[in-house]
Each structure stands twice: as C-alpha cells, then as structure tokens.
C-alpha cells in the first residue's frame, strides 16, 4: 500500500501532501497540513464541525477522501479571515456571543459564510435549515442565527455603493 | 459580608464585551484535545467489549504486541489494585474502584463498549489494526438493560459486591438495586388523605447523553521516574490529576495536568475515561500517547444521565395550598452505582413549600454505560413529574398555573435543602416576571398548547485559587485553575477590571496547569463565576491595598489617607493632597519596593445560593402524525447578577435546548443483545438548528449578598424546567396527558389514537 | 478507514475494468454512505473507484426525451437546473431532503438508489416519476426501471462490475404534478420513518388520468403501489378516492418496528403522507396545465 501524493490549492496556497487511500480530507488537513481548525465531532457527516469548501461547495471533510482533493480548491476556517482582518461572520459571532465552548464554531462559520454567498438575504428559517447540518450543544442556536443574519445585513450594506450606505 | 456594590456605579459588570479568547475560536487557532501534539507522540486506541455482560476469562495480546509499529498493549491487569474509596468529583461523588474499573474492565465487561484492552502504536491505523489481533476469551452472561429487567426475580447480578444501601437493615445478598435514599418530613399519608384534591400519576424519562461536540481526548507522557504530564480537555484539571493519581497510585505533585480548550462538557467531563489508560500506555511505550474517542465510543462508553421512572402523589387544599406529597422513583444507574439519586430526591420539591413529604429514590445498576453528571444532575428527572402534576392540580382546582405556583413558591427564610433558612432566592420574582411576560397571555393558534414549569438547582461554591499580578506597565494578569467552558475568561476579566477600576482590556486571564496554581474545583455545579469570581475579586482587593500602601509610601502619607479610584491612587491628605498615581506609575516603580504587586487567594465559598427558573413553552401538534414542534419558548431565571449578560442568556438558551431535546427526541435504543443501536448523532437525535425557535430570555436579578457582585450560579437551572414545560404544552395541544419521554411522533400518535 | 487503493478512471470502460478486476472494489460518487460504512468497518481493505472524473457522469442534460442525470451529479446540482425543478419538483425536493447541505453537495441520487436503503428519500419520488437508469458493466449497457435496482436492504440487482451511470426522467406530461413527503422525528438530518412519492396527471376537466404512488421505509425496498394509483385514476381526487388510495397504500405496507419507528406507526403514516403528497401533486398539476 503506497502513499498517494496529492496537489491541491488550500486557502489560496499550492499545497502537496501524502495520504493513504482511505484517509479522509479532514485527516490530511489536520495531520499533513496542520490545519486543525476543522474538527472531527462524529466522523459520519452528522455534526458539520469539519465543514470546508471544496471547489465552491461546502462539504463535510470527514466524508471526502483526501485523494479526491487532487487538483481541487479547498478553503478552510483558517482562510476565512483576510490576513488579520476578520470576516464579518467571524466578527458577528464574537459580537453576538454566538459561541460558548467554540468547538463547533469553525464549522458554523464556514457554513454561514457559504450561506451568505449563496443567499445574501436569508430568512431566519432559511438560516436554520441551511445550518441544520451543524450541531451546537451549547447555545441552543439562538445567538448563532442572530449573528448570521446580522452578518448578512452587514455584507449587504458593504456591497451597496458608498452613496447609499447609511452611516450607522 | 460583602454587600453587593451599587449596580448603577458599575462600569463593566453588566456590559457585553467580546470575550478575550474569541479570535482564537473564530479563526480555528484554539487548541482543543485533538489539536494538541507532544513531540514523539504515538497513538492509542481502546478495545471495547462486544457484549453487554461477559466474564473475561483471559486476554491474549501476543499477536497485537508483535504487529510492527505497536509500542504498548495493556489490559485491566496493568492497573494497580485500588481500594474502594469515595471521593468528591464536584457534581456528586465517585468511587475510585468503580472509576478505575470503568476506565478498563478486569473480571467482567459490564456493558457493550466497556474498555477491555488498549494499544499504543506509531499511527492510529496501526493501533486500530492491533486491536483486531487481541484475543479476548469471553463467557457471555445474561444482561439487564432496563430497571424492570434489573429488578426481575432471578435477574443476573451485575456486582456481587453491591448490597442495597440505605435500607433499615443491610441485606445479606447482593442486588442490582444499589441504594435507597429517603427524604421525609411530616406525615404525608395523613396530609394527602385530608387534601381537597390529590393528583397521582406515573412518569418516565430516558437516559440521555450530554452530547458535547468534542469527543473525550487526552495526551499523556509518563516518565520512568514517576513524573508525568497530561494534556486534556476536561471540566477540571485538578479532578483529572487527583483521580489519575488515586487510580494509578501516584503522588499528585508528580502529575502535571494542562487544561486544553474544552469543546463542551455539561457535567460529562467531570470524570476520567482515558487519562489513566493513556498514562499506562505511555509508561510502557516510553513515549507520549494520545487517545481520542470516536463519537461511537462517546455514546457507548461515556455519560449518560440516568433515566428515571417516577410516581407522584401530590395534594392541595381547595385554595391551592399544597398539603403533602409522596414521590417514589427509580433511576437507571448504568454499570456502576452513582446515579444522582440524592440530588433527584433533594430537588423534586425544592421550589415549593410542602408541609409533609416523603421522597424515596431507588438506584438500579444495569448493563449500560456508567452514568455521569449532566447539567443539574438528577433534578430534571424528578422536577418533570412534579411540575406536570402541578399543572394537573391547577386544572383540577380551576386555578391559573402561575397563581398556583406563586401560592406555594419558596421564599427567603423558608427552610432550604440543607434545612437552613433560604437566603435571597428569587422564585417568586421569576413567577411574577413570567406572568407579566407577553408570551404568557399571547393567543395560541390551532393545535397549539402552552406549558409553564418551574424548578431549581442548589448551585455550589467549593475551592478556587486565583493569582492576580500587576505587570510593570500596569496591565494585569489573572491566573485561575477553572477551565473556561463558555466565556469565563471574559467574566473573570470583567470582575477584576471592575474592582481595580481599569478598562476590561487591561486585564488578561490565563487558565493554568495544576502545577502553576493552587487547587480549584472543576468548572461544574454552576460554581465558576460565583466561586472563582469571588477569588478574583478578593485578589484584586488585596492588590489594591498593596498599591495604596506603595502610593502612600511614595507620598509619605498614611495608607488611610490614600483612596483607590478609577485605577489610580489619590492622595487625600498632607503635602501631596490632590495628587494621583496611576496603576502604571505605581507598578513602574516596582524596583523601589519588593518587586511586582501580586496576590494569591484561595477561597472556599459556602455562601452560594440556589437558582430558580420558570419556563414558558408553546408547542404545535400535527394531529394526523403526532409530530410536535416548539413554536415559542421563554426562559425566566433568577441569575443573581449577570456579569456578562450575553453569556448568561447563552446558558439559559443552551440549557433550554437540551431540555427540549430530552423532552422530544433524545433517547438510546438497545437491541436484544444489549447493544446501543444509535451510537451516533444521526439516530440519537439531539436538536438541530431547524428544530428550535428563538429562545427568549428574561434575566431576573435578585443579587446574592454573599458575592461581591451578587453572582448566583446560572448554568444548571435552565435544564430543570423544560421537560415539564414541553410535556405540559404538548399535553394541552393533544388533549391527553403525555407523561413518558421522549414525546416522539409515534408515541404521541399512539396516545392520540387511544384518546379517540 | 483502511482502503487498498484509490482509482480515478476517466472513462466508463476503465471504471468497469477496475471493478471487474477487484471484486471487492466499490464505486464512489458522493461517498456519503460509502465512507460512513467503511469507517464502521464494512468493506475493510476495499479499493475505491471514483466515478467523478468520468466526464459524462456529471451534470444534467435536458432534451425532448426528458432529462439525463449523470450518476455523479450531487443532489444540490439538481436545484441549479431550472427546467428539472419545474418539471419534477418532487424528485428534486426528495433528493434535497437527504442529510444536510454539506451531505447533499456530495450525495447523488444514483448513490442513494444503489445504497439500497429502504428509507432512501429520492427513490420513491423517482419510482413515482417513472424514472429509469442506465446500468453499465462488463456485459454492456442496459436500461432498467429504478425500482428494479434495490433488491433488499443494502443489496442490489447489479452484477459484478456493474454500476449505474445515468438516471433518466421522462418529460413532464401536460397536467402532470409530483411530490414527495416524508416523516422524520426532527426537521432535518434524519432517515425517513416513512416516505411517499406521487406523480399524477390531471386532465383539463379535473379528472386524474394517471397516477403512480411509491412508498419508502415500509418494506425491504421502496414499493410502487399500483392499486393506490389506480384508486385515483378516473376520479376528481375526492375524499372517497383519497380514502381508497390510502387504504391501498396501507395494505401494501410490510414494515418492521425498529429504532426509527413502530410498524403500526409506519403503516398509518404511509396513508397520511401519501394523501398529503397526492394533494400537493394535484396542486402542482394545476400549475402545469
């Protein structure tokens, strides 16, 4: 059983890593690339703590073979902020106290950012169903939903021409 | 005592700053148990029993040891012999022998998933492959899963060392009924016989798992000289140290436990499962060893809270005044005794004045995972039947359910759980706030029902140690031993900054390892903001006194002539009257004195107060399918004083959501072989985001005079009322009493069919 | 999760050859069932044949003969095809009830079919819609109705080296409407306790001229209940016809009691959900008159 050499773009950087045929993308990100932000909460696609973006679509990285990443584009929680500037979803999670233990938070932030790129003005119900694949046991989801909706509002504001923006 | 300070003067307490560990947690930088790696680390894995109950006749590990890459294999025989010993774990007590046997079986495997051997190898894959090479010779024994099976005549006896405790006469034959606990007051039989109304009904709750999203995990490094390090995610680093030392016969000072970030606990991380195993593997291998549970292992071998079957009789006079209550319940303890029967009995009626009562709790051991603490351990299981009966009592009496509760609510001065008069408790204030809330009188839609329920939790104090020091530039460092499970770094910094008169950002908080700070009990029992917070405030006051002394020395004034205000010393008398020295100016002159100003404070705070809550729940029923949905939810709670209101609200919301899950969807499923059939999030069914509405919160503030900022524990109470609030709402929507949780669609449908 | 090899062939022929060469090899499209099963210890040491690099297996083609959905097309991609959403909303909705968004971004209808769970959400909807699939293998290519693929829980009628390459849906008939509804204890992230798929055609006078009703999770495989469809044909789908339809659905149920629901509940719910799905499909037929 020989190892497979995989070349992929991860958070904008060209990366290479070695994996076994049965390794998950989550294993490779965490152990080969030291990107430990994505977490394994279940290993069966039920908790969403390992959510990453693969070629523009969010997936559970525990349900992707590492070898499948060859030639593909992967984005993880570590690439959500622009350098030291937090993404509005991250800022709003902090402002709304949308995390307690924080273990599920990377998965929620990646999923919420994907939602707002897909649907910039979601209803509460749309937020809740989009995030149904991300489990949180601490918060009861209330503050998470509020943070995501507020981040959406901020992103919509930022995307309007400067002349239309309210100065709040 | 420390009277609460005037809240109108607070600059920081009651505000909502961003938590100091926030950026690490929203960017993926925070280090939880699976993220930590020690140099040279290898990987452990645990072989678990495929049988619910089996005698272990022998274990052959030779083939596993021979697999290339395997560095160590251990079994129960590698554990030292320990005496049975009761120790305090923070949220209840534990027995070291049982804890050791739960970490690894010796004579018998007691549940499907019970650890029987462990391997450490150069990769996780090799370790798991080696497990398959271990040959265990099992004699499969008949098993018992339910209370009825465990108590049936001729049932297999799980422990021949367990004799029912708490009986008038100690029995001479071992039993699966491990204990009885009774609280009695007055003559409840006579009281019920004389009551105008008596409600009697039977109820059941299922065992439920804490469902922290981070599985258990640790890294252990055990050197030949007996010194060791453990890095772990838990609610208490000292708890891990002390239990591991007791189980392995080591000196506590030889084990240094470093707390990693913790991905949820809810009581489930107040014991050890992996650490002693990782230590023994590390000692054999001479390398640091990491063990991470899979989710499957978490469900099979850790937690849960016990499920309980209860019968309640409760009576009232015609005006609604409670006359007496008789409660008998049985809790399913799992593989070892220790199933919260005591707190279940204590909390059942703790929020009401009941002149005559008899509460009898039984604990039964079963071939299921050993139970662990879960948020307000034991209280939800008995408050649920009591609150459902209170609702039926209100209906029978034609009374408003809040009025009935107001009539009987405990008040300051009433006798509390410890038979001492209650202090500043706020149950009445919670009931009044619930009554005034728009939710309580909002119209209901078709097929909707409303439930209200109350409840309480005793809370706790316990020991905490804090070191507070002032750097040369006047910034402040706070070191505690209390793991931050949900924002306590923020509340500690806020209390320190408030006391010192400094900006929030000028205080930084670190959670230290067990060799770097004095003992602190686990983050459990709703104690951290209260007890560790008090140590923080006391340390800040000592530091202020020292800073004042130095300022006085600089000015040549008497310390009594120096006032500390707004983060600076102000000279009130003498030549320098009117002058001030900031904390930075004083700290910068540390060289003139005996170095930096610092203070170490260890406190044990007995003056905690219980918390009370009232929840309002609206459910909507699909009468054709039995599906229930919570459409509106409001949690009202006496929080003493909210240091950081966001994180207090978060506790109310999170506890409510867990209680809703317990009421509607969470349960274990066992097959006829005694195996857990739903050891995963897919079929265990904790609530997902789309299952819940927003959870409205009302923070009633009745400050605790025993805490400098009025803090009461807030974390545990919120899971106490929801089981009843949901079940009462559902019963009203369905027009039939629903008393057996979870209220799954098939069960509700069957109840609707039996009504028709 | 031990696997012996990972292959990513670029043609169907190559994929078939790999599957024939290694009887233990498993085809991979979305992997949302396969990887979970491997992690639970099934298919230990298997080799993986990833179908996603075969160009023709990804994407949706629409023409006069209907729709061709490549076997490696994820469920969420169905939502991006407006013609498919307009023609077969019940099928698209069924496929987009599976798991979470994360799962549906990987999971495929072909995988849902070949995993052969009796509770698969997309299968009753596909059966009701009259879907067929292309099976490729060492013996060549064959077209079969989707309901012939699962043969029991976890087993299929596919031969050694065979896999499903495409799913075909007919064009939507004038006056046609479809729907799929399921019962789960939560609102998302559950396996169907019962599922009901309906496709029907209403004529201009409001009479049902054709109806196919399929139910899931009430037998070892999803069932096409012909008697239930027949109960609606020739009627205006009045209460009496709905009662006859629901009776036929319940009569066809052969459920088990398991951790997800009791047999009695499943049978009762099959009737309730089929009734609701028929009414939804009828409403949709009006939008397509």
Image (cartoon, rainbow, N blue to C red):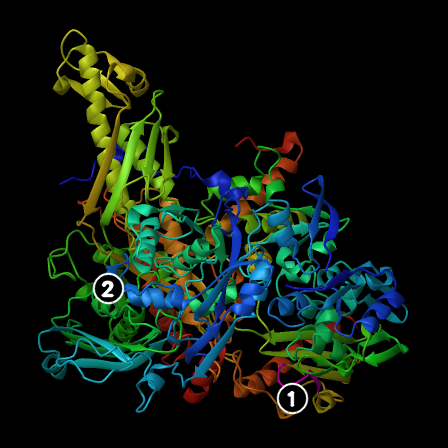
Whether C222 is among the magenta residues is yes
Residue B150 position, x and y percent, is 33, 84
* Residue numbers of the magenta segment: C217-224
Disc 2 is placed on an element classified as: loop
Q: Is residue C66 left or right of residue B113?
A: right
Q: In the rendered structure, the residue with mark 2 lies on which chain?
A: B
Residue B522 position, x and y percent, is 31, 51
* Residue B629 drawn above or below residue B177: above
The part of the image, by quadrant, that contains residue B740 is bottom left
* Residue B272 drawn above or below residue A52: below
Disc 1 is placed on an element classified as: helix
Residue B457 position, x and y percent, is 26, 60
The part of the image, by quadrant, that contains residue C273 is bottom right
Which residue is tagged 2?
B85
> Image quadrant for the C terminus of chain C?
bottom right
Which residue is more in the foreground, A153 or B536?
A: B536
- Identity of the residue drawn at 31% across and 49% down: B238
Q: CA distance from mark 2 to mark 1?
A: 61 Å
Q: Is residue B73 visible?
A: yes
Q: Residues within 10 Å of mark 1 (few under 14, many from 20)?
A: many
């Amino acid at each position: 059983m020989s190892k497979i050499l995989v070349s992929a773009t991860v958070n904008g950087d060209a990366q290479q890593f070695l994996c076994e045929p049965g390794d998950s993308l989550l294993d490779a990100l965490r152990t080969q690339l030291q990107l430990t932000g994505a977490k394994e909460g279940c290993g069966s696609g039920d908790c969403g703590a390992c959510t990453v973006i693969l070629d523009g679509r969010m997936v559970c990285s525990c349900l992707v073979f590492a070898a499948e990443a060859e030639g593909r584009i992967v984005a993880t929680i570590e690439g959500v902020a622009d350098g030291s500037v937090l993404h509005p979803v991250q800022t709003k999670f902090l402002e709304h106290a949308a995390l307690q233990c924080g273990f599920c938070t990377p998965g929620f932030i990646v999923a919420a950012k994907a939602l707002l790129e897909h649907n910039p003005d979601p209803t509460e119900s749309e937020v809740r169903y989009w995030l149904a694949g991300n489990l949180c046991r601490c918060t009861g989801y209330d503050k998470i939903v509020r943070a995501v909706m507020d981040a959406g509002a901020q992103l919509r504001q930022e995307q309007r021409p400067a002349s239309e923006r309210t100065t709040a | 005592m420390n009277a609460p300070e005037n809240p109108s003067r607070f600059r920081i307490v009651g505000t909502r700053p961003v938590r100091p560990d926030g950026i690490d947690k929203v960017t993926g930088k925070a280090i939880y148990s699976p993220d930590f790696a020690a140099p040279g680390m290898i990987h452990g894995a645990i072989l678990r029993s495929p049988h619910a109950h089996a005698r272990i006749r022998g274990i052959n590990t030779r083939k596993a040891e021979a697999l290339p890459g395997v560095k160590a294999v251990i079994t129960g025989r590698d554990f030292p012999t320990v005496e049975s010993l009761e120790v305090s774990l923070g949220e209840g007590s534990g027995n070291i022998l049982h804890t050791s046997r739960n970490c690894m079986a010796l004579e018998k495997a007691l549940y499907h998933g019970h650890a029987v051997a462990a391997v450490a190898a150069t990769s996780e894959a090799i370790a798991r492959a080696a497990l398959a090479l271990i040959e265990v010779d099992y004699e499969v024994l008949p098993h018992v899963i339910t209370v009825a099976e465990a108590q049936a005549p001729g049932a297999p006896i799980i422990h021949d060392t367990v004799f029912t405790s708490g009986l008038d006469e100690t029995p001479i034959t071992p039993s699966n009924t491990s204990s009885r606990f009774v609280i009695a007051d007055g003559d409840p039989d006579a009281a019920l016989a004389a009551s105008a109304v008596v409600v009697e009904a039977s109820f059941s709750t299922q065992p439920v798992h804490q469902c922290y999203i981070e599985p258990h995990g640790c890294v252990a490094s055990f050197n030949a000289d007996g010194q060791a390090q453990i890095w772990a995610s838990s609610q208490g680093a000292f708890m891990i140290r002390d239990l591991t030392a007791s189980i392995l016969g080591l000196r506590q000072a030889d084990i240094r436990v470093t707390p990693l970030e913790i991905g949820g606990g809810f009581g489930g991380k107040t014991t050890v499962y992996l650490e002693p195993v990782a230590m023994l593997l590390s000692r054999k291998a001479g390398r640091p060893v990491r063990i991470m549970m899979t989710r499957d292992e978490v469900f099979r071998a850790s937690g849960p809270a016990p499920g309980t079957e209860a019968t309640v009789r409760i009576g009232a006079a015609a005006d609604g005044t409670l006359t007496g209550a008789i409660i008998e319940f049985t809790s399913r303890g799992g593989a070892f005794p220790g199933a919260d029967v005591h707190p279940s009995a204590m909390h059942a009626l703790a929020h009401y004045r009941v002149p005559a009562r008899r509460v009898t709790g039984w604990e039964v051991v079963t071939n299921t995972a050993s139970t662990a603490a879960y948020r307000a351990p034991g209280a939800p299981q008995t408050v649920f039947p009591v609150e459902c009966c209170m609702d039926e009592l209100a209906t029978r009496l034609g009374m408003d359910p809040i009025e009935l509760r107001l009539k009987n609510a405990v008040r300051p001065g009433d006798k509390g759980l410890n038979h001492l008069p209650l202090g500043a408790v706020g149950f009445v204030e919670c009931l009044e706030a619930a009554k005034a809330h728009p939710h309580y009188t909002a119209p209901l839609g078709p097929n909707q029902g409303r439930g209200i329920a109350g409840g309480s939790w005793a809370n706790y104090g316990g020991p905490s140690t804090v070191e507070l020091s002032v750097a040369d530039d006047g910034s402040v460092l706070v070191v505690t031993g209390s793991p931050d499970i949900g924002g306590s770094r923020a509340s500690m910094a806020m209390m320190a900054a408030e006391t010192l008169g400094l900006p929030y950002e000028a205080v930084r908080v670190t959670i230290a390892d067990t060799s770097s700070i004095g003992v602190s009990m686990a983050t459990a029992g709703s104690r951290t903001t209260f007890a560790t917070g008090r140590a923080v405030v006391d340390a800040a006051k000592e530091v202020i006194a020292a800073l004042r002394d130095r300022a006085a020395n600089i000015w040549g004034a008497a310390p009594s002539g120096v006032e500390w205000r707004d983060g600076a010393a102000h000279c009130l008398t003498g030549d320098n009257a009117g002058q001030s020295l900031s904390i930075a100016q004083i700290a910068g002159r540390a060289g003139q004195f005996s170095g930096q100003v610092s203070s170490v404070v260890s406190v044990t705070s007995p003056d905690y107060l219980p918390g009370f809550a009232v929840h309002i729940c609206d459910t909507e029923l699909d009468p054709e399918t039995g599906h229930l949905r919570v459409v509106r939810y409001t949690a009202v709670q006496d929080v003493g004083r909210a240091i950081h209101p966001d994180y207090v609200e978060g506790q109310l919301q999170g506890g409510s959501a867990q209680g809703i899950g317990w009421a509607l969807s969470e349960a274990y499923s066992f097959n006829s072989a005694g195996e857990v059939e739903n050891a995963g999030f897919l079929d265990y069914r904790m609530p997902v985001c789309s299952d819940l509405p927003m959870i409205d919160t009302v923070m009633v503030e009745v400050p605790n005079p025993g805490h400098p900022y009025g803090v009461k524990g807030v974390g545990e109470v919120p899971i106490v009322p929801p089981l009843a609030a949901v079940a009462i709402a559902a019963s009203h929507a369905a027009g039939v009493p629903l008393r057996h949780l979870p209220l799954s669609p098939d069960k509700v449908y069957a109840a609707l069919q039996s009504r028709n | 999760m031990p696997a012996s090899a990972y292959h990513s062939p670029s043609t169907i022929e190559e994929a078939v050859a790999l599957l024939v060469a290694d009887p233990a090899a498993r085809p991979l499209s979305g992997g949302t069932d396969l990887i979970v099963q491997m992690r639970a210890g099934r298919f230990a040491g298997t080799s993986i044949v990833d179908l996603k690099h075969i160009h023709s297996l990804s994407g949706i083609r629409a023409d006069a003969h209907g729709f061709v959905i490549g076997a490696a097309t994820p469920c969420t991609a169905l939502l991006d095809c407006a013609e498919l959403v307009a023609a077969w909303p019940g099928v698209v909705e069924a496929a987009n009830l599976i798991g979470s968004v994360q799962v549906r971004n990987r999971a495929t209808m072909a995988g849902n079919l070949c995993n052969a769970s009796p509770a698969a959400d997309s299968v009753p909807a596909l059966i009701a819609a009259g879907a067929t699939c292309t099976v490729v293998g060492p013996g060549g290519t064959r077209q079969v109705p989707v309901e012939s693929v699962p043969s029991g829980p976890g087993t299929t009628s596919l031969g050694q080296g065979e896999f499903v390459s495409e799913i075909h849906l007919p064009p939507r008939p004038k006056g046609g409407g479809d729907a799929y509804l399921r019962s789960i204890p939560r609102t998302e992230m559950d396996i169907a306790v019962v599922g009901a798929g309906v496709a029907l055609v209403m004529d201009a006078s409001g009479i049902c001229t054709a109806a196919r009703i399929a139910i899931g999770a009430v037998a070892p495989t999803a069932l096409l209940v012909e008697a239930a469809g027949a109960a609606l044909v020739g009627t205006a789908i009045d209460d009496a016809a709905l009662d006859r339809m629901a009776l036929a659905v319940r009569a066809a149920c052969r459920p088990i009691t398991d951790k997800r629901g009791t047999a009695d509940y499943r049978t009762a719910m099959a009737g309730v959900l089929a009734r609701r799905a028929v009414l939804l499909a009828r409403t949709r037929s009006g939008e397509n008159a």
